[in-house]
Amino acid sequence: MTALARPSLLAMEGRWLLRSRLALAVLAVLMGAIILALANGRALLAAQLASRAAASSELAEADARLRAGMARGMPAADAVLLPIRVRMPVIAPLPPLIDASAGQAPLAPDAGAAGLRSRADTLFARSTLENPELLMRGGLDLGFVVLVIAPLLLVVLGHGMIPADRDSGALRLVLAQGGGVGRLLLARSLPRLALVLAPIALALLWLGLSGPDLPGRTTALIWWGLIALASLLLWWALVLLVNSLRSSADAAALALVAIWALFTLVLPALLTALVGLAQPLPSRYAVIAKARAAEVAATAQWDNDHAEAVSDELASRRDALARTLDVTGKVAAAIAPIMADHAARRAGRQETLDQLALLAPPMLAAQALARAAGSDAGAVAQVQDAAAAHVAQLRAALARLATRPQPMTPADLDRLPRFVAPAPAAPPLGALAWLLALASGLLLAAVRQINRLQPD
Amino acid sequence: MSPAAIAASVAAKDWAEYRRDWRLALISLLVALLAVTAVVAAFVEVTAHDADRRATIAADRVTWEGQGARNPHSAAHFAFWAFRPLPPMALLDPGVLPYAGSAIWLEAHNRNPAQARPAEDLAGGLDLGRFSAAWVFQYVLPLLLFIIGAGLVAREREAGTLRLMLASGLAAGQVMPAKYLALGRIAAVLVLPLLAAALVATLLAGPVDGVALLLWLSAYLLYFAILAALAVAVSALCATAAQARLLLVGLWLVLLLIVPRLGSGLAMQAAPVPTPHDFAAGVQAQMKSGHDPFGKDGKAFEAAVMARYGVTRLEDLPVNIDGLRLEAAEQHGNRVFDAAWGRLAATHEAGRAALRLAALLSPLVPLQNLSMALAGSDAAVQRDFQDRAEAHRRRIISLLNADMTAHAGAAGFDYHADAALWRRAPDFAWQPPGTAAALARSWPDALALGLWLLAALGLLRLAGRRLAAGQQ
């Protein structure tokens, strides 16, 4: 067989694949899953945009009302309460590729309003109305297609590339026509890989062309695509390695499915559970109990929470405001150590899991895809930490305004600190490198094994 | 040899082959270890949660009773927290509980959503379900059953032993029951020790309703019976074991991983939940537009109260009017909350109904519904917890308002109650609805599972007929 014959072998394999009912079934499942994933992603994106827009518009209206009140002018006894009425938006940045990998986003709070009485632990407390029954079932996004469905489809397409011919006794004949195991595997690999990779690439292209113009979306798409490609190449390298062993098609299928189940289904769940047991987080209830005890202790002399209802006299309202500041300050101080401990332990646990994910490439790829999409647990934690810091900063600024003799003005409102979203995390370069290294290692092992392989 | 004896010897042969295949034995051992780990992890989680909850309730009670003398309405603003206990059977199936809030702040003027969802604290990763005994039974064991079952008939055909079997007196129609029995025996050996470990751990975690436990086990037996029938039927319909294995893995992927997620996605779109801001804004708008005894309706309210007590001046009232105002405002708020939360519950219920359509395409959906309901960890139980907590909030706030009404007199908001009043406020106590309620809401799921079993047995019978027709 000459070099000129190579394209014809490839074309022949491609034609054979397109005529195969199995390949058509694989394509149908993949396309169906991708269409559903894109529809789900679009719905999630729309819901997240709507939620942020609703919060933004509500707070903008409140801000406008406040400014209008200031412009009209008000009695000093009312003006003194202005700092308590300020509500500043804390809107989490929309993950740029949430419609590809939802990650933690469906569970993460997207918007809150910070003010003088806000607390870091309750800032987002109202954002838990979702149907838990549907959350429990999980979602089907493009990440799920790449991590769970596509590898199994690669196994279905590739498990018998050599073993099936060996089982039927046709391997010697096929190799005589194909010119060697390596070239045969290459000719059989390319159409099969294309069958799985092309629809995913098209889906990504569609996301790029149709998606909203979000900052960082193009970069996210590139990184997401690279991680997906590396992850699928790793699976294909494994398929090639198993093909290079002297096993039957049945044994190859069993081995590949078992490996898939171990690394995709079992290890991620097991490692997450074990890390949770080994590094438990401080109880959320402890934060509640501590905050409550501090609040009750600090309010022994407090009449009620309505500073405006205490009295309509300026002095009484100033006193009530001072007591409010005292209470919020004491509660914040009481819960700060628990919150800090919680954040530190959460980060430590995530770090352990990131390291353990090196043992389970699909888990590593899942984290990397979510990170590229901006929807990973780390991004959510960063936003919450930034929101907590903003609440403290805003409270301090409002406290200064509340305790000075002059009433608050629109210029004061303009000078108040705004919530600044944390910078996006660095791209998942380490994960990409690890996935590529593993894929290369498996591929080299497969090539070595293939070179030794002789038809029976 | 009678056909029954031949069928028994076929089952014995398959059992022996299963034991001799070290790969399957190894996979089975790993699955067993996985299930035991899941049970241990769940046991630690359930017991730790309960200890944490009890400690927090005790600390909260000390804070409440030790708050000193203060106005009852001031106390109403700090009021109580309601913490949801985990039912012992959540150790088997945590259901929706990781995704639902477990603590609710019970305060005056507001009905707050449950917060502290355990899933929010989960480290990120590949989320294919919460690690638990139910997860192993729902996802991992079916995959193992499919892998083992794939070769039961197809391998006999490939090896030519199927002809031999038929020649030795076993009718083609009897092969399928014999193989089904064989897979059933293997499945029993795999599942029963794991179930026993899970049950012991559950019983250690707390008192369990024996009927619920038996029904829970029955639901899983039904599920495994469906999957085993599908596995044997596909094995008989496929030409080779490899084909059967891949088809079954594909079925597993579609039935257990894709369809439930597809159903969930469609349900979210069919019954969209309002955004938190829209929900809160709607409640606030209703609150402001209704009866306001402190503001626009103040004068009319005072007149009505004075008329009720037969006096013409507020000073002559035998009760404190601010206490009455607070209670009237609370009653108005309660009506608003009932309407808003009722609509939210209806939206969740519509989502559940839409999701149930997926039960036609996957036996996992009805199994999960049934399993969670019997374990006391489904959405209905969560809703009951939230509703009971709200009823408790209303009781406590009414108690405090009544005290202010009766004792504040002219002092009004300067009146201070003492620890005697705080002690009269009971802790939140909640018992999840029982097994009868679980069955009442889950009968469509039980019916769906029954229909799935009939369909799977029908497929098995069809495969048997094709085998008989082919006489291979």
Image (cartoon, grey):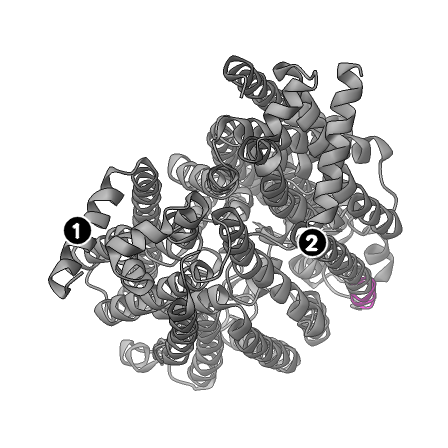
Q: Amino acid at mark 2?
A: Trp
Chain at tag 1: A
Q: Nearer the viewer, residue A180 or A72?
A: A180
Residue at left offset 48%, top offset 30%: B238
Q: Amino acid at mark 1?
A: Ala
Relative to A303, does residue A170 appear above or below in the rendering? above
Q: Is residue A302 magenta?
A: no
Q: Residue furthest left?
A: A4
Residue B200 in picture, x, y percent from top left = 87, 48
Relative to B286, does residue B165 appear above or below in the rendering? above
Q: Residues within 10 Å of mark 1 (few under 14, many from 20)?
A: some
Q: Which mark is residue B22?
A: 2
Residue A342 in picture, x, y percent from top left = 62, 76
**Is residue B190 left or right of A187 when viewed as pictured?**
right
**Kind of element beneath mark 2:** helix
Q: Is residue B431 visible?
A: no
- Cα–Cα span, label 1 and label 2: 41 Å
**Is residue A401 left or right of B192 when viewed as pictured?**
left
Q: Residues within 10 Å of mark 2 (few under 14, many from 20)?
A: few
Residue B462 in picture, x, y percent from top left = 53, 16
Residue A263 in picture, x, y percent from top left = 54, 61
Q: Is residue B51 visible?
A: yes
Residue at left offset 32%, top offset 55%: A99
Q: Nearer the viewer, residue B406 or B90?
A: B90
**Which segment did they paint magenta?**
B58-66
Residue marked by disc 1: A11
* Residue B231: quadrant of the picture: top right
> Quarter holding the N terminus of chain B?
top right
**Is residue A310 left or right of A61 when viewed as pictured?**
right
Chain at tag 2: B
**Kind of element beneath mark 1:** helix
Residue at left offset 35%, top offset 40%: A29
